[in-house]
Amino acid sequence: MIAGRWARGCLMLALMSGAACAAPAPSAVSNANEPPVIDPSAEGRALRLPFDAYKRTEADIELAERAVDVLAGQCLRQKGYSQPALPAVTVVEAPNRRRYGVIEPLVAEQAGYHAPLTSAEKERERADRARGGPRDAAERSAAHDCLQGSTGRVYVDAADSPLLARLEREIFEETRTKDVHVRSAFDAWRSCMRVRGQEEYADPLAAAADDRWQDLKSAQAETAAAVADVACKKETDLVEVWRRAEEELQAAAVKRHPAEFGEVRQALEKERAEAARIVQSTR
């Protein structure tokens, strides 16, 4: 899915190696230049689409991660090992925060086109570091086995719909490349960027993917481009135009596939209920 998250892979890495994870960015950053912590703004939180109701929320993922951790911890104790439990963290729901590129002025000013961390991600990163990792190969193997078994007991496969993922990709690309209103907004956005002294990118995603942003020496230019990008999105109403185009097609897709989307929703509800039961059983 386009709006995915790093958390499940991060949990596996943390359990297997003791390494802490950070949200991915377009390029690697050193500890001295780590991403700033910026929680989603009102703009980011307000950006919603019909398919969101059929995907895991940030709260769903956080709860499922803790449920997996509870089960993995029980498994490890049976094997003679122990580890501190993952703490609960408060997440902010913003599933489409970066769907159309950077849209928040503060993010543009402080992170350019790179993804900032949220306070929840930073808190979880600190918790991962604090609890450490396996002490030897035997414990690492045990952690791997326990994690695999525990993941299968929490996550419901039917909640990851290939149909939804395919439709989301297709609708996103169709609106990006064919919708006349979106293309017109791109034209206006490019004109605005040109007036502000920026390069003429095909669209905001092309601007975010500029190879120059891989080089830390281009940080000042990256910030200037990102700030102009956000301003031009607002000036041209590009985000709302694009969102409306996707909203119409996504809503139509849900109506065309009621049984399939209904199954996804049921699977998500089952997964949420089981994760909550597991976490609550430890209280």
Image (tube, rainbow, N blue to C red):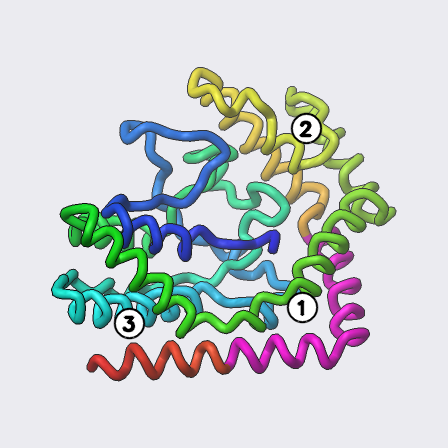
Span colored in magenta? 240-269
What type is the residue that disc 3 sits on?
Leu
Residue at horizontal 41 percent and vertical 57 percent from the top: 8
Please rate how many residues cluster around mark 3, counting C-alpha atoms within 10 Å: few if below 14, some from 14 to 19, many from 20: many
Q: Which residue is mark 2?
A: 193
Residue 164 pos. (x, y %): 68, 64
What type is the residue that disc 2 sits on?
Met
Residue at horizontal 31 percent and vertical 60 percent from the top: 145
Residue at horizontal 16 percent and vertical 62 percent from the top: 84
Q: Which residue is mark 1?
A: 50
Return the disc, 2 or 3, that comes first in the chain's sequence.
Answer: 3
Comparing labels 1 and 3, the label whose residue is closer to the camera:
3
**Contact flag, marks 2 and 3 (Cβ < 8 Å):** no
Secondary element at image label 1: helix
Please tell me whether residue 268 belongs to the stretch shown in magenta: yes
- The total number of labels drawn is 3
Q: CA distance from mark 2 to mark 3?
A: 51 Å
Q: CA distance from mark 2 to mark 1?
A: 30 Å
Give residue 259's quadrant in the image: bottom right
Residue 177 pos. (x, y %): 81, 43
Q: Which residue is mark 3?
A: 71
Residue at horizontal 49 percent and vertical 36 percent from the top: 108
Could you tell me which quadrant the C terminus lies in?
bottom left
Please tell me whether residue 197 belongs to the stretch shown in magenta: no
What type is the residue that disc 1 sits on?
Pro
Secondary element at image label 2: helix
Residue 233 pos. (x, y %): 66, 41
Q: CA distance from mark 1 to mark 3?
A: 33 Å
- Up-down: is 255 above or below 98? below
Q: Is residue 119 left or right of residue 247?
A: left
Q: Is residue 13 left or right of residue 85?
A: right
